[in-house]
Amino acid sequence: MALFDGRLLAAVLVGSAAAAPLASDTCRYGNCEHSPDQASFLQHARDMTKSESASTFDIHNPPIRQAASLPGLASTHPYEYFSGFLNGGTPPSGRGTMYFHYICAMAPNWRSMPLTIWYNGGPGAPSTFGLFQEFGPYILSSDSFRTEGYRTHKIPTPIYNEWTWVNVTSICEIDSPPPVGASYCTEGNGTKGSTGGPSGDAYSCGPWTDKTTAAANHRAHISLLNDAFPEFEASQQPVSLLGESYGGVYVPLFANAWIDDPIKGPNGTLINFHGFAVGDPFWACIPMAGKAIDWCANLTNVGFLRWPNALPGPYWDMEFFHGHSQMSEALYRDIMATCSMDELKGVTMPVSETCMELVSTRAGEEIGSYNAYNLFEACVSDTYPNGTVKVLDGLSKPSPGSGDTGLGAPCLGSAMGKWFDLGVTKAALGIPSNNNFISLDNAIGMTYTADAPFVGFVYEKAIKAGKRVLVYEGDTDASGLSTAPIEDIVVPFFGNGSGVWTPAGRLGSASKPLGLQMTRPWRPFGVLPAGRKVLGGYTIEWEDGQVRFASIRGAGHMVPVYRPAAAFTLFQAFQNGTSPPTLPPSMAVR
């Protein structure tokens, strides 16, 4: 399903490509000078292939910060990579210690640049997906199999990303909660297998909830900014939290913990907390009398025409598919004439049998199969059943449109999974050789219970504290978290929508609207560098831009994959406290 980013997108690998370029110091608006160094790349690959280390990892005293490299590249200059483990205290099992694994891609001159802490969702998705498939300096995709380095050494090549967000801020991804990704607990009995250490299964750390995940990550943030990167205390560079999908619950709760217990550096000076941003976020449910805390959603239904999924009723899914011409006008009219608005929007649940026949059975027949991450994605499998990678030479590669087209993005394929499974990669990133690299979806395969209500209270607290807030959406995300349903939450909630029914429930005493001043209504924005006649999407601003909602045109659930230039433009505006470029009205491009 689209919420949790645990899936590796499938691909057909086409064409041919040179090894990833080595970036030089000049990087602006995605235009970086670079020069390939094929000889050093090949020698580096040979050296790294020989360098898999023996198992000398001390699970009770893992490295806090160490320099890291990316197998398949001779150099990551001008970006530095670090990795390590953060002590999160006692896990939910009550036994031993949990350690969060992180990887940081540091901006050029990072000691004088901002820092952002990134989370994918899940629950159960490693945050490495964002750093290595969405916005990092080097991306693992279908192109990673089409290089000379891969053909020679079978190491997927990280491909240089000219629109990397790391030209704006250093980014540290943290795998959460343990034992997701390379994080782990020193002891088991959380139960199932119950073996501790890096080889433990997904149950080894015990049962997680939204609230215990927030508390554990707050301890990890304290460790990150005291033990791993104390430099940010003295520099006072802004530090932000960022996530997508179920990160829409994670990140606000992490921000809430930070505001309630401000993080100080090792010398007692407060870290400069900038704010938070969430992409295609799930907001959790507004408390309703007599209903479970997660009454408005059943995330195992995401990607299916069953409700609740990420939405309480079929209304927003039907509008999405109808608006994208995925069903007939006749069926749409039948749905609107037969189903009551209360059952369509989840005010009354479940949907009646007569309505369900239309919105599920008949709509399913007309819509056909679709990708819940991106309605228009057409990637197919890049592996044979025996695991062999298909590389189809001689076919033309889709144009990436200079970072501006959602339909020309490279397929992600299996490159990241294969790269992280290599012993040489684990050694280079400080990951023990017996690590399981757990990657799950919808918390299936681990014990996780949602216990957080609608996270709007955090927005209120953060905005009152002067923090910046960004909510951004991909408008072709078919998971239920695209532009319209989230706009139907944020506009009445940030404004004066008391009593309004939203995809999270009815705004009222348990979720009082904030009454913010909308200082800039819906408008189109362009992409950097300013002056290009390219539509990035649309934004709404409150409180002179302190709070922003954005819809990115042509982007799916993982926005930077599909519209890297537009995503870069929007994220830079968030970091700098500015507005993205304005486009003239009714601009026609011919």
Image: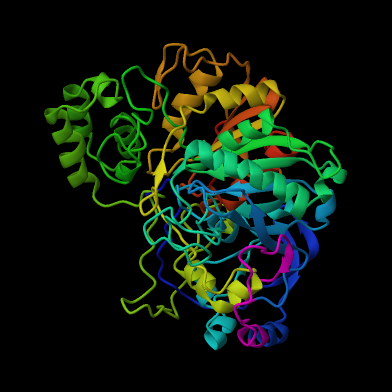
Q: Where is residue 470 in the image (x, y as percent from the top left)?
A: 61, 34
The residue at 18%/46% (across/down) is 365
Residue 32 in the image, given as x and y percentages of width and height: 74, 62
Name the one closer to the observer, 88 or 41.
88
Direction from residue 273 to residue 277 in the image, left or right: left
Query: How many numbered circles are shown?
Result: 0
Q: Which of 570 and 193 is in front in this view?
A: 193
Magenta includes 350? no
Q: Residue 10: x, y in percent?
A: 40, 64
Is residue 163 visible in this depiction of the protein? no
**Range drawn in magenta:** 46-72
Question: Outermost residue toward the front?
Answer: 95
**Residue at 32%, 32% in the rendered image:** 319
Relative height, residue 181 to residue 217 (above, below): below
Q: Name which quarter of the figure residue 55 lies in.
A: bottom right
| Residue 219 in view in this figure | yes
Coloration mode: rainbow
Vertical comparison of 201 with 157: above or below: above
385 vs 173, left or right, is left
Q: Nearer the viewer, residue 208 or 89?
A: 89
Residue 120 percent across, percent down from the top left: 53, 49
Residue 65 forms part of the magenta stretch: yes
Question: Predominant secondary structure in magenta?
Answer: loop
Name the residue: 53% across, 42% down. 213
